[in-house]
C-alpha cells in the first residue's frame, strides 16, 4: 500500500471572506509580504489542490501531513482547509493523518494573526484579530475573530478528522495516555526554566491503524515552554515555542512521548506491523554535517538554531524509531545518524509553497521502505494573483526582477528564492562585508582569491588584482549564491534549475579553495567554508527516489527497475 506524504502545504483560502463579506474580490496577500517570506502564500491554494488531485489520480487513499496544513491557523483558514480535505475524502475515499505544526495551533489560548490583502488597484487592507494592530500603510483595517489562531483546547477539535481523535473506521487508535481520545485525558505539565510558571498542556500525539498492518505514529513535537516571570498564560510572548527548539525541547519536556514510542515500536515489531513515524520537526541534522561551517560563516542562522542535537537521534534510536518524516524546514533532504550499529534515517520533506514544490510517496516492501518524490511541475492557476501583483508593483515601483514572467509554478518558486537571497538572506544572515562583496564580484575574482596564499581580511582596493587568466568565467557571484540556496533547499531536485555548466565551474572553485588552508576569520577561509557546504549539499544522501533498508538504515537510490548501492552515511 502506498502512502502519500505532503508537508507544509500552508493552505490559504484566497476566496474566504475573513469577516468582511462587504469587501468584494479574492483575499490575496501582497507581493511585498510574499517576497519577504520564506514561503509563498496565495499560490498555496492551487498548489495544494494540484497535489491532492495528483494523489487521487494515482489511487492513493492514505495521506500523511507532517504539520502546517494551514497558513497560520486562522479560524476561517482551518474551516476552508478541512472542507477541502473532506471533499477529497468523500469523492476519493482518501483519509488524512496529520501532526500539529508551529503554524496550526498555538499553546493554550492561541495568538493573533494579521495579514494584508490586496485590492485590485494594488492597495491593501489589513485583516487582523488584534484590536491593537496598527493600520499603518494599509488603506483599511478589518478586525475579525476569523483571523485568530486558536490554542490546543479550542483549535484541535476542528482538525478532528486528521487522526487526532478516534474514528469508527480505525482498526486501532491510542495516545501516549491510553485509549481515551478525550483532551482532558491527554495532558502533561510543562514548567519554565525557573520552575515558577507551570502550565498544563494538551499533547496531540496518536497511533492509528487505518488499514490492516499499517501503523501511523504521529508525534506532536510542539512544546510551548513558559517564559520565566510570566504569570499570565494568555499572551503569545509568555511562551517559547518550538519554531527553533523543535525536538531539542521535546527531550527536555516531553520524554514520555519517546517512552511511549519505544513501546509502540516494540509492539509493531512483535505484531508484524509496518510503522511509519512522523512529526513536524527533524530528528537528525539536516545540514549534512555542515553545522560548524554554517555557524562560522553566518553565525546562528535559522537553520543552525533549528538543528537537533545528536541526543535527539540517539533517543529516537533507543525508542526503536528507524525512519522519521519531518517538515518545517521546507527542504528536500535525507539525513542519517548511525551509532553502535544502529541507524535513524530522517526524511526531511519539501513544502508545496517553496522551492522545490514536491511531495513523497512511501511504500513498505520486503524489509525496506521505498520513497518516491513527486515534483509538482504543473499547477493550474498558479498565477491567479499575478494581475494583483502587477497592480501593486505599479503602485509601489518595487523591483521584483523577472518574478512575474515565470511560466510554471516551479519557475515562479525558483525566482521567488532568488528574490529571498537578495532581500532576506544576504541582508539578515550574511556578515555585512561578505554581503557587500557579493554584487561586486564574479567567479574570476573568486578564483583569484583562491590563488592568494596570504590571508586577506578585506577585498583589495583594486579588484583587477584578483583576475586570473582571461579564459576564466565571468559568472556573477550573486548567481552562485542563488544556486547555492537552490542546492541547499532542493539537493538533487535542483537539477534543471542549476545548469550543469555552472556546476562544473563550482567544482573547480571548490577544488581551488580546498587546496590551501586559511584562518576562518579571513576572506578566503570563509569562502572555503562556503564551498565546503556546497560540496556537501551536492554529495548528499539520495533524497529523490530511494530505498531505506529498515534493518541497517542503508539508503540506496532507486532507478526504474534497478538499485544502485550507496554507502550508508552517518552524522
Image: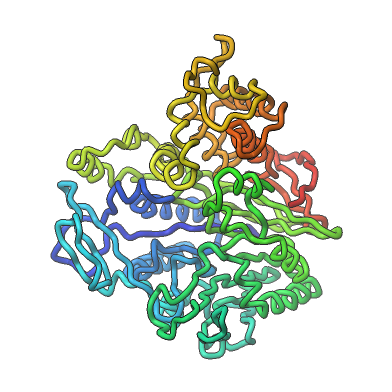
Tell me which residue sits at (41%, 76%) in the image. Answer: 158
Tell me which residue sits at (51%, 44%) in the image. Answer: 356
Kindly indicate the quadrant of the structure image that contains residue 364. bottom right
Q: How many marks?
A: 0
**In x, y percent, where is residue 182?**
52, 88
Position of residue 45 in the picture relative to residue 430 (left or right): left
Between 195 and 460, the one lying in front of the other is 460
Say if residue 261 shows up in the picture: yes
Quadrant in which the N terminus is drawn: bottom right
Q: Residue furthest top?
A: 470
Between 490 and 252, the one lying in front of the other is 252
Tell me which residue sits at (58%, 43%) in the image. Answer: 297
Position of residue 132 in the picture relative to residue 549 (left or right): left
Say if residue 366 shows up in the picture: no
Position of residue 510 in the picture relative to residue 187 (left or right): right
Kindly indicate the quadrant of the structure image that contains residue 409. top left
**In x, y percent, where is residue 403?**
35, 36
Quick check: 69 above or below 376? Answer: below
Tell me which residue sits at (26%, 39%) in the image. Answer: 398
Kindly indicate the quadrant of the structure image that contains residue 494. top right
Amino acid at each position: 500500500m502506498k502512502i502519500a506524504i505532503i508537508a507544509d502545504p500552508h493552505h490559504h483560502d484566497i476566496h474566504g471572506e475573513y469577516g468582511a463579506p462587504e469587501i468584494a474580490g479574492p483575499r490575496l496577500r501582497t507581493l511585498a509580504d510574499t517576497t519577504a517570506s520564506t514561503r509563498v502564500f496565495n499560490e498555496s491554494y492551487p498548489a495544494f489542490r494540484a497535489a491532492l488531485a495528483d494523489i487521487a489520480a494515482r489511487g492513493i487513499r492514505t495521506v500523511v501531513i507532517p504539520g502546517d496544513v494551514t497558513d497560520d491557523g486562522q479560524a476561517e483558514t482551518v474551516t476552508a482547509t478541512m472542507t477541502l480535505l473532506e471533499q477529497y475524502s468523500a469523492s476519493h475515499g482518501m483519509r488524512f493523518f496529520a501532526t500539529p505544526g508551529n503554524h496550526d495551533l498555538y499553546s493554550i489560548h492561541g495568538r493573533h494573526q494579521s495579514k494584508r490583502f490586496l485590492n485590485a488597484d494594488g492597495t491593501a487592507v489589513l485583516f487582523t484579530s488584534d484590536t491593537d494592530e496598527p493600520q499603518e500603510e494599509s488603506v483599511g483595517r478589518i478586525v475579525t475573530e476569523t483571523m485568530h489562531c486558536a490554542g490546543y483546547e479550542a483549535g484541535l477539535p476542528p482538525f478532528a478528522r486528521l487522526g487526532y481523535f478516534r474514528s469508527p473506521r480505525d482498526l486501532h487508535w491510542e495516545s501516549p495516555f491510553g485509549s481515551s481520545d478525550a483532551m482532558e485525558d491527554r495532558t502533561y505539565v510543562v514548567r519554565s526554566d525557573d520552575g515558577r510558571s507551570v502550565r498544563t498542556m494538551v499533547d496531540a500525539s496518536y497511533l492509528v491503524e487505518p488499514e490492516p498492518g499499517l501503523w501511523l505514529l504521529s508525534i506532536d513535537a510542539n512544546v510551548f515552554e513558559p517564559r520565566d516571570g510570566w504569570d499570565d498564560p494568555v499572551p503569545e510572548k509568555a511562551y517559547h515555542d518550538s519554531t527553533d527548539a523543535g525536538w531539542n525541547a521535546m527531550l527536555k519536556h516531553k520524554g514520555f512521548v519517546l517512552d511511549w514510542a519505544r513501546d509502540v515500536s516494540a509492539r509493531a515489531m512483535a505484531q508484524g506491523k509496518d510503522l511509519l513515524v512522523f512529526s513536524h520537526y527533524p530528528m537528525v541534522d539536516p545540514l549534512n554535517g555542515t553545522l560548524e561551517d554554517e555557524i562560522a560563516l553566518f553565525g546562528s542562522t535559522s537553520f543552525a538554531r533549528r538543528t537537533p542535537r545528536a541526543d535527539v537521534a540517539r533517543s529516537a534510536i533507543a525508542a526503536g524509531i528507524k525512519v522519521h518524516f519531518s517538515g518545517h524546514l521546507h527542504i528536500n533532504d535525507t539525513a542519517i545518524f548511525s551509532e553502535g550499529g544502529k541507524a535513524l534515517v530522517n526524511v526531511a520533506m519539501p513544502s508545496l509553497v517553496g522551492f522545490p514544490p514536491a511531495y513523497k510517496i512511501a511504500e513498505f516492501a520486503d524489509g525496506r521502505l521505498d520513497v518516491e518524490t513527486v515534483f509538482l511541475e504543473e499547477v493550474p492557476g498558479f498565477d491567479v494573483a499575478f494581475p494583483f501583483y502587477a497592480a501593486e508593483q505599479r503602485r509601489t515601483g518595487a523591483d521584483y526582477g523577472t518574478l512575474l514572467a515565470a511560466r510554471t509554478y516551479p519557475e515562479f518558486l525558483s525566482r521567488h528564492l532568488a528574490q529571498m537571497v537578495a532581500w532576506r538572506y544576504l541582508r539578515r544572515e550574511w556578515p555585512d562585508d561578505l554581503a557587500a562583496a557579493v554584487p561586486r564580484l564574479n567567479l574570476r575574482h573568486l578564483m583569484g582569491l583562491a590563488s592568494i596564499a596570504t590571508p586577506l581580511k578585506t577585498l583589495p582596493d583594486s579588484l583587477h588584482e584578483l583576475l586570473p587568466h582571461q579564459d576564466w568565467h565571468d559568472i556573477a557571484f550573486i548567481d552562485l549564491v542563488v544556486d547555492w540556496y537552490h542546492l541547499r533547499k532542493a539537493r538533487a531536485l535542483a537539477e534543471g534549475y542549476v545548469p550543469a555548466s555552472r556546476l562544473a565551474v563550482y567544482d573547480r572553485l571548490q577544488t581551488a579553495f580546498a587546496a590551501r588552508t586559511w584562518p576562518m576569520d579571513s576572506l578566503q577561509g570563509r569562502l572555503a567554508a562556503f564551498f565546503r557546504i556546497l560540496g556537501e549539499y551536492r554529495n548528499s544522501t539520495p533524497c529523490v527516489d530511494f530505498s531505506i533498508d529498515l534493518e541497517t538504515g542503508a539508503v540506496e537510490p532507486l532507478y526504474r527497475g534497478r538499485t544502485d548501492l550507496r554507502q550508508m552515511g552517518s552524522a
